[in-house]
Amino acid sequence: MKLSNRLYRFHSIQIGVKHFLLILFVACMLHSGETRADALTALRTTLQGLNANTEIKGALDVQSIKVNAKANGGKHKDGKQKPPAQLQLEINAGDGLGIYLSSALLQQINDEQQAHADDSEKPTPTTDLLRNVGPMEVEHIMSTAPMLLHELNGAESPTIKPSQLDGAPAQELTVTVPLKASKKDSSNISDYQGAMTLWLNAQGMPLAYQQAFHAKFCKFFLCVTVNETRNGKLQVINGRLITLSYRDETKQSGLGQDSDTKIIYTLSLNVGPDVKDKIAK
């Protein structure tokens, strides 16, 4: 009887330890989930406070490279690179947005268009690039916080882990982002995958971000697959979040032809000593 009681007590202790470990594991998982959710909430709060109308002046350099590769029996021949394009815009952002095109740039565009009118085979790379660099794209560079808040709307499944950025410690926050399209357009989209990763410093300030999208667009029996990746390096100047450099790469396949387009934006700031002192490190 005494032996049986000892075995019973030992068995009860084992069950108690297992029960305690299970509770501890669940508590850790819940705490981890709360930490990830808290990190996303804190980031949204931080972004809401980074929309000051600080006056920013600078030159925005934009380059574009596009390569087409025709499909042939499931294999691809060497891609043919279209003429690269480059332009520079003078930007003045504050309580509004000003975009200045130099007379030399306007003359280059006029020359391209005239040459194309004389010979339809003549490319217009600078003109085509300028069509892509609209006011909204420039606004997202000069005032990045509202754009990030929009992209994070509806974000789910946050994960956070220690990381590094340019050799310095950082926190890496990754979320899945929903498809942002109208019901009409959504009906033609399948196999959608979207994610965003942000690198944060110890104070929770965003230092950089990456967006990745994958989707297939089909109309009747014609389908095109698109993969897009966007990378931005960020900086805070006196309460205003801007993008110092931005790279947008889009790979498209389908309908017998593939393409790979890269557009690279680089912002060179024109700031005085008083503004430099207010740049967040």
Image (spheres, rainbow, N blue to C red):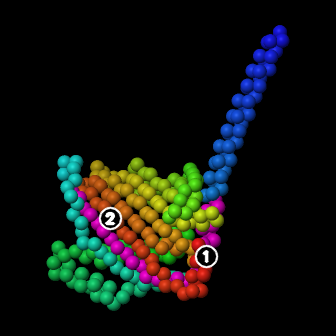
Asked if 116 appears above or below 28 in the picture, the reply is below
Q: Which mark is residue 239?
A: 1
For the N terminus, give its image quadrant: top right
Tell me which corner region of the image, top left, top right, bottom left or bottom right, holds residue 129: bottom left
Tell me which corner region of the image, top left, top right, bottom left or bottom right, holds residue 43: bottom right
Q: Is residue 3 left or right of residue 166?
A: right
Which is more toward the observer, 270 or 162? 162
**Disc 2 or 1, which lies upstream in sequence?**
1
Mark 1 Cα-neighbour bin, 10 Å: few <14, some 14–19, many ≥20: some
Span of residues in magenta = 41-70
Q: Residue furthest right?
A: 2
Q: Position of residue 269 (x, y in %)?
A: 48, 81
Asked if 21 appears above or below 197 in the picture, the reply is above
Residue 62 lies in the magenta-colored region: yes
Q: Amino acid at mark 1?
A: Gly
Q: What residue is rendered at 16% in x and 78% in y? A: 119
Asked if 239 appears above or below 176 in the picture, the reply is below
- Residue corresponding to mark 2: 261
Q: What residue is rendered at 71% in x and 39% in y? A: 24
